[in-house]
Image (spheres, helix red, strand yellow):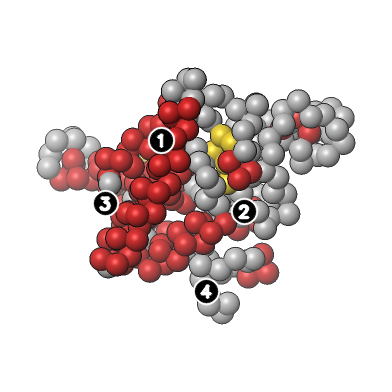
Amino acid sequence: MDKMGESDRARNRGIPATPRDGSAVEIVGLSKSAVRWLLELSKKRIFPYHEVTVKKHGKVVTVSYEEWNRKIQANFEKLFHVSENPSDSNEKHPNLVHKRGIYKDSYGASSPWCDYQLRPNFTIAMVVAPELFTAEKAWKALEIAEKKLLGPLGMKTLDPDDMVYCGIYDNALDNDNYNLAKGFNYHQGPEWLWPVGYFLRAKLYFSKLMGPEANAKTVFLVKNILSRHYVHLERSPWKGLPELTNENGQYCPFSCETQAWSIATVLETLYDL
């Protein structure tokens, strides 16, 4: 994510606050969605190609869309899901697990503990590539996200139980606190609005797989949450939805008052509803 440290006093200048330098969960989901689409077009002879060539260890390797699609499908949950079973053989760093039943934020980060941070990004993958997820595991992860990340208008960008969580974004603050100075916590807790649309759409999709009762409760939940956005739109002099809020929906003076993606994902939720 795009926050770069700016404080000389706190010594975070030039350091990315949230590099997410492994395979980010939403990018894997978007890749799966794109490869699946290309595979479908290729099979229908609408798209004239069926493979790509890449350099790997100095050699040129050919990978078909079918193989690429299959590999992501076969390995996604194995590598991204944090099993509720402490003895799961797929878990390479059991000592870093602090929440079970969630999906990792990334895989293969330079700081392995960052993989295990609970963020809302996995819900993007759920929407664009739902076939990657087992319904029951997805539902459990969404329940945890609802409890830990869902705010009045947006989604917390980091689990409040995380040691570097801070839900107040203050870009003017310049002190000795490495994690906060000059808004270093931009993506470490403040509640961004655009992810809430993906969360709600994921809830709607998987609730249908969980049965009529779960779906009915989810529809009620989604309408309830979207009513808050309606109230905000009615009262906003910009007639729009903000970039983010501080924790628990508090106004953030450093947030953009209206952003396209904040309202775009809400519109997509209404379409799915």
The answer to whether mark 2 and mark 3 are in CB contact below 8 A is: no
Q: Nearer the viewer, mark 1 or mark 2?
A: 1
Residue shown at 42%/67% (left/top)?
A: 137
On the image, the x and y values in percent for residue 67 come to 30, 53
The answer to whether mark 4 and mark 1 are in CB contact below 8 A is: no
Q: Secondary structure at mark 2?
A: loop
Q: Nearer the viewer, mark 2 or mark 3?
A: 2
Q: Is residue 106 visible?
A: no
The answer to whether mark 1 and mark 2 are in CB contact below 8 A is: no
The amino acid pointed to by label 4 is: Glu
Asked if residue 229 is positioned above or below residue 111 in the image, the reply reads: above
On the image, the x and y values in percent for residue 258 come to 49, 24
From the viewer's perspective, tell me whether residue 120 is left or right of residue 197.
right
Q: Nearer the viewer, residue 189 or 13?
A: 189
Q: Which residue is mark 2?
A: 159
Q: Nearer the viewer, mark 4 or mark 1?
A: 1
Disc with the residue nearer the chain's start (4 vs 2): 4
Residue shown at 38%/32% (left/top)?
A: 264
Q: CA distance from mark 4 to mark 2?
A: 18 Å
To which quarter of the image does residue 92 belong?
bottom right
Disc with the residue nearer the chain's start (4 vs 3): 3
Q: Nearer the viewer, residue 262 or 153?
A: 153
The amino acid pointed to by label 2 is: Asp
Q: Which residue is mark 3?
A: 66
Q: Which residue is mark 1?
A: 230
Residue shown at 67%/58% (left/top)?
A: 161
Disc with the residue nearer the chain's start (2 vs 3): 3
On the image, the x and y values in percent for residue 22 come to 57, 48
Q: Which residue is mark 4?
A: 84
Quarter occupied by the N terminus: top right
Residue placed furthest toward the top: 237
Q: Secondary structure at mark 4?
A: loop
